Image: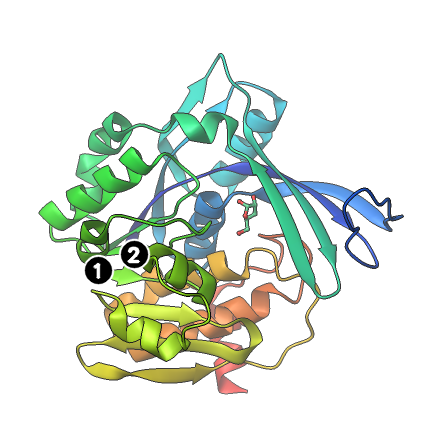
Amino acid sequence: MPRIVVVGSINMDLVTLAPRFPGPGETVLGSRFFTTHGGKGANQAVAAARLGAEVSMVGALGRDAFGDQLHAGLAQEGVDLAHVARLDDVGSGSASITVAEGDNQIIVVPAANARVTPAQVEAAHPAIACADAVLVQLEIPLDAVEATLRLARRENVPVILNPAPAQKLPAEWLQLASLLTPNQHELATMLGDDANTDFRELMRRAPCPVVLTRGGEGAWYRDDAHPEPAHQPGFAVDVVDTTGAGDTFNGALAVFLHEGLPQAVRKASAAAALSVTKLGAQGGMPSAREVEALLAR
Ligand code: RIB
């Protein structure tokens, strides 16, 4: 059973389904509203746990009603929460999500997530040192992201940097990551490059192995064994909600990384495809058996 550590955000997702996205100053009547558990870090942790990994999470929650619900939800998924801080003077993170036109728009209010510290990462040293892979994203302070990259590198543990939401990052950090998992926009932003540059060219410019996700089109990967970007086609499914598909992909990639990059990307693509067939970021995250069944189809 792979051991995975996720350093990242935990949010309550406030989801509205609508026939289309409103323009600035416009009101659109939606068809449904619900709250559900999310946050890129928590989503990746749950994706990995559902696939059978032993998962430990580093993050922060407020001591509010959302915090209680999110904490209980992660515990129920079997995620170890010893390194998730409960803070008295700040609320839990939230994300206002509109699902429309087969896509989504998200506004995140980080709240407690903005208080994840490098010291918390250091306190998780024993878990990180014996992990098979570490996952980190950009919804927490960048000093905590950097501490994660440096600690994992020091301990020789593969660390996957999912650079979402998009931000320009110091070039040195990109060399600390074992694997980058951006989409095209995120890769262009983090490299400080032109978003219109061909994505294969952007992949060649990255200073470490890259897996680039392209939604339903699938994923492309480049590493020392595949110096030219290789393609993993997407799996055809009925799309209900794409929220959390990238997180499912990342969680699965970490779990299957020990099987080699091509196989890990194949299984992560299958897991991500299954995740979009149900509502909510975590609603459609599959078990290992469901991934195998899709691959056998
Ligand atoms: O990647 C999807 C996630 O982004 C949502 O669950 C939301 O909380 C935001 O963090």
Which residue is at the front of the view, 28 or 97?
Answer: 28
Q: Within 10 angstroms of label 2, few (less than 14), some, or many (20 or more) residues? A: many
Q: Is residue 273 left or right of residue 30?
A: left
Q: CA distance from mark 2 to mark 1?
A: 6 Å
Q: Is residue 272 above or below residue 94?
A: below
Q: Is residue 117 above or below residue 279?
A: above
Which residue is at the front of the view, 17 or 188?
Answer: 188
Q: Within 10 angstroms of label 1, few (less than 14), some, or many (20 or more) residues? A: many
Residue depicted at x 30% and y 49%: 169
Cβ atoms under marks 2 and 1 closer than 8 Å: yes
Indicate the amino acid at tag 2. Answer: Ile
Q: Could you tell me residue 1's position as x and y percent?
A: 30, 58
Indicate the amino acid at tag 1. Answer: Ser
Residue at the farthest bottom position: 297
**Disc number for residue 129:** none
Residue at the farthest top position: 89
Q: Is residue 94 above or below residue 239?
A: above
Asked where in the image residue 103 lies, by quadrant, the reply is bottom right
Q: Could you tell me residue 278's position as x and y percent?
A: 67, 61
Find disc 2 in the rendering and name its residue: 160
Find disc 1 in the rendering and name its residue: 178
Q: Is residue 29 left or right of residue 254?
A: right
